């Protein structure tokens, strides 16, 4: 697995401090991005949490996921959560070490009382003493929250006081990209009131691996079922919802999101509604499947059109908490479909997330570019190699193609909607459930090149069997210090 060492540089450890006006939760920030550019230790917020106990428990839940591995749990995981300030809320995000669980805490404006909320993305230090202090926060304890360096930063000119060097697998970057694609296909499937939510979550298995299950909305609760009957929601690896146990006593409701039509295991999102906050855990389709391998972004990565559109759309993003596709389409002059493809591509650089509760994208900025996601994806690399080798031949009409690999061939066909299928083993096993195979990707690249060359050439139509020059990817960027999960 490809890894690169990233340094988290903090001016001091995060801590809960006692002061004359009550307790202060000071979350130290590492290097990050702001509207004014990169900042070593940005400040995003200073004020009070409206409901300290639920907020402390929810922050611990996000940290629990960052420190956990639900698949092969004997291996250690340790990552500092990412925090994004969107002007009207704070978002804390983390991935499990196995990349199969994505956690996000949205602290909304109703949950904050203080200064204006800034804009930007960084990491926050979550250490063991901080975790212990957060676990002791009671409902009657007023809690001041500061996200950023404190006023004593002027005494630290000699350099950072705390530095963590963490080997960061590239799959976590791909996980951020894949989760926004997956979540964009979710719809609300069920909502349980507080009492039923507590009863349901407490009945879930906590240890071992329970495998993929299904639940069906039944009145005000969820009933387990052994197969994907109509209306069922996939619950893959229910033991992976253990982090929600921390907030049960504060939960107002439990909302479930997932795709409507699902005859096979799918991802799903489980949202605990808290006072002024939402804590969401998104589960991959199986505990053994990390989000990094789902392949939902490959079609957008493989097209030059999405790359060009992404450059235009990125200029229009402004740390918005809600990004409306229709508004971006009107501003950019692109169709909604091209805007979505551009957002998907921007997601590979960690710039885009998706909030199923609001059915909208949101802007964050991690110090990556999409070139790194491309370079780290073996299917995309293999597809480009096939195009470069001239292995793709479009047949008459372009609806079918032949891909020659060594001494055998694969046939790729497009259905009436344009969706490609293939005769290879990958397609036979997953049926598109984990993104396109390398052969379909290569055919898509050649078809795009043929269409582009045909529209630009004055010499007439292109021979459909002639090899087409490949669309080449940009060189990957160098690792950047202070990168998030």
Image (tube, grey):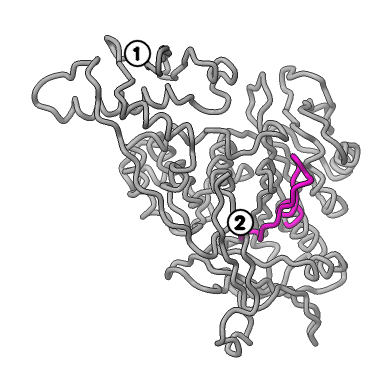
Disc assigned to residue 469: none
Locate residue 163 relative to residue 439 in the image: left or right: right
The image shows residue 41 at horizontal and vertical percentages of 55, 74
- Marks 1/2: CA–CA distance: 45 Å
Q: Earlier in the sequence, mark 1 or mark 2?
A: 2
Residue at x 44% of width, y 59% of height: 318
In the image, which residues are magenta? Answer: 63-82
Residue at disc 1, secondary structure:
loop
The residue lying toward the viewer, choosing from 470 and 348, is 470
The residue lying toward the viewer, choosing from 123 and 319, is 123
Q: Quadrant of the C terminus?
A: bottom right
Whether residue 215 is visible, yes or no, is yes
The image shows residue 338 at horizontal and vertical percentages of 38, 36
Instruction: Identify the residue under disc 2.
Output: 167
Locate residue 200 relative to residue 278 in the image: left or right: right
Residue at x 60% of width, y 67% of height: 8
* Label 2 Cα crowd, 10 Å radius (few <14 / some 14-19 / many 20+): some
Determine the image quadrant of residue 209.
top right
The image shows residue 23 at horizontal and vertical percentages of 79, 78
Determine the image quadrant of residue 337.
top left
- Residue 78 is inside the magenta segment: yes
Determine the image quadrant of residue 458.
top left
């Amino acid at each position: 697995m490809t890894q690169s060492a990233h340094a988290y540089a903090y001016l001091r450890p995060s801590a809960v401090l006692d002061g004359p006006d009550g307790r202060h939760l000071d979350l130290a920030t590492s290097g990050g991005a702001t509207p004014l550019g990169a900042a070593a230790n940005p400040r995003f917020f200073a004020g009070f949490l409206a409901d300290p106990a639920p907020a402390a428990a929810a922050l611990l839940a996000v940290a629990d996921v960052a420190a956990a591995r639900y698949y092969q749990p004997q291996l250690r995981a340790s990552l500092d959560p990412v925090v994004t300030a969107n002007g009207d809320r704070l978002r804390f995000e983390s991935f499990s070490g196995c990349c199969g669980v994505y956690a996000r805490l949205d602290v909304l404006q109703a949950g904050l009382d203080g200064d204006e909320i800034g804009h930007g993305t960084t990491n926050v230090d979550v250490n063991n003493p901080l975790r212990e202090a957060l676990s002791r926060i009671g409902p009657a304890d007023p809690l001041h929250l500061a996200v950023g360096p404190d006023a004593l930063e002027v005494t630290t000119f000699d350099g950072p006081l705390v530095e963590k060097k963490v080997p960061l697998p590239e799959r976590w970057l791909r996980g951020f990209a894949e989760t926004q694609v997956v979540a964009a296909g979710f719809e609300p499937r069920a909502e349980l009131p507080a009492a039923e939510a507590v009863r349901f979550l407490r009945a879930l298995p906590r240890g071992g691996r329970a495998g993929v299950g299904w639940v069906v909305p039944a009145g005000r609760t969820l009933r387990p079922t052994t197969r994907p009957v109509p209306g069922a929601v996939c619950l893959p690896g229910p033991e992976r919802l253990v982090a929600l146990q921390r907030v049960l006593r504060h939960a107002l409701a439990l909302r479930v999101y997932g795709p409507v039509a699902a005859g096979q295991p799918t991802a799903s999102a489980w949202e605990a509604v808290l006072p002024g906050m939402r804590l969401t855990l998104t589960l991959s389709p199986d505990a053994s499947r990390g989000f990094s391998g789902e392949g939902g972004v490959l079609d957008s990565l493989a097209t030059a059109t999405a790359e060009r559109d992404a450059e235009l759309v990125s200029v229009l993003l402004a740390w918005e908490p809600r990004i409306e596709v229709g508004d971006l389409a009107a501003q950019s002059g692109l169709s909604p479909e091209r805007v979505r493809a551009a957002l998907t591509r921007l997601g590979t650089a960690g710039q885009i997330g998706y909030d199923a509760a609001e059915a909208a994208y949101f802007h964050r900025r991690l110090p990556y570019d999409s070139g790194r996601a491309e370079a780290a994806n073996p299917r995309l690399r293999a597809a480009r190699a096939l195009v470069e080798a001239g292995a793709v031949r479009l047949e008459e009409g372009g609806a079918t193609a032949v891909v020659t690999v060594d001494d055998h061939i694969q046939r790729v066909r497009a259905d009436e909607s344009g969706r490609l299928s293939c005769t290879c083993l990958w397609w036979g096993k997953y049926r598109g459930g984990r993104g396109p195979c390398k052969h379909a990707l290569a055919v898509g690249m050649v078809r795009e090149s043929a269409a582009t060359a045909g529209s630009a050439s004055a010499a007439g139509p292109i021979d459909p069997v002639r090899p087409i020059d490949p669309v080449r990817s940009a060189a990957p960027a160098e690792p950047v210090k202070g990168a998030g999960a």
